[in-house]
Image (tube, rainbow, N blue to C red):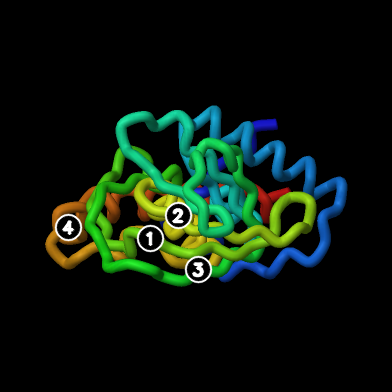
Amino acid sequence: MVLPLTYFGNPILRQKGEPVLEITPELEQFIKDMFETMEKYRGIGLASQQVGRPIQLTVIDIRPVEDRPSTLELDGEEADPHSIMPLVLLNPEIEPLAAEVSGPEGCLSFPEIYGDVSRPEKIRVKALNERNEPVEFVCGGLLARCVQHETDHLHGILFTDRMDRDTKAELRDELDVLQKATKAILAEAAEADSDQ
Ligand code: ZN
């Protein structure tokens, strides 16, 4: 089932996710729904906050993007980044391993809004997977950027928070319009609820 997305201005995007402690059948279905939603909107990463649920769960699949390379190391050996796709990360923890690089990012919660963000080029990731097994890998390039963007979501941090002042100033009007539209829709929905 494709889930409704939450957009900038929705307070749920600012909520820190609760750690996931148990994989229930309901959660397994939710993970499937997240992948379906991400594919429908052509994203390469989706955090649970973006579909209205503040827990520490993200799904990632970078395979649709062919022009931005990624690197992967498993147990110290170079590996094909596609070999771990699609990726489910629960309670991810990140350790930076290289200097920051600037690169373009977008976000399904910010339709048509893009901007450069600086992030460490290479990171170590520790998390649990969808079978509740610990996973650990080192990644670089697009995959590292994507994991960091999604892990930020799980802590209520948005990519606009990490943009430099000039980039954010350029996007200010678009961000204001989106935020106001989201708040108006939420207010309308709340009013409709209270009328019942
Ligand atoms: Zn995002």
Which mark, by number, is residue 167?
Answer: 4
Mark 1, secondary structure of its residue: strand
Mark 2, secondary structure of its residue: strand
Q: Nearer the viewer, mark 2 or mark 3?
A: 2
Residue receiving disc 1:
122
Is the C-beta separation of discs 2 and 1 under 8 Å?
A: yes
Report, in whole angstroms, how far the alpha carbon at label 4 lies from the one at label 3: 25 Å
Q: Amino acid at mark 1?
A: Lys
Q: Quadrant of the N terminus?
A: top right
Report, in whole angstroms, how far the alpha carbon at label 2 lies from the one at label 3: 10 Å
Residue receiving disc 3:
94
Which mark, by number, is residue 139?
Answer: 2
Report, in whole angstroms, how far the alpha carbon at label 4 lies from the one at label 2: 26 Å
Q: Is mark 3 within 8 Å of ligand 1?
A: no
Of pointers 4 and 3, the one earlier in the residue sequence: 3
Examine the rendered structure and indicate whether residue 119 appears above or below residue 42.
Answer: below
Q: Judge whether residue 192 can be spotted in this image.
A: yes
Q: Nearer the viewer, mark 1 or mark 3?
A: 1
Mark 3, secondary structure of its residue: strand
Asked if residue 117 lies left or right of residue 108, the reply is left
Q: Amino acid at mark 2?
A: Cys
Q: Nearer the viewer, mark 4 or mark 3?
A: 3
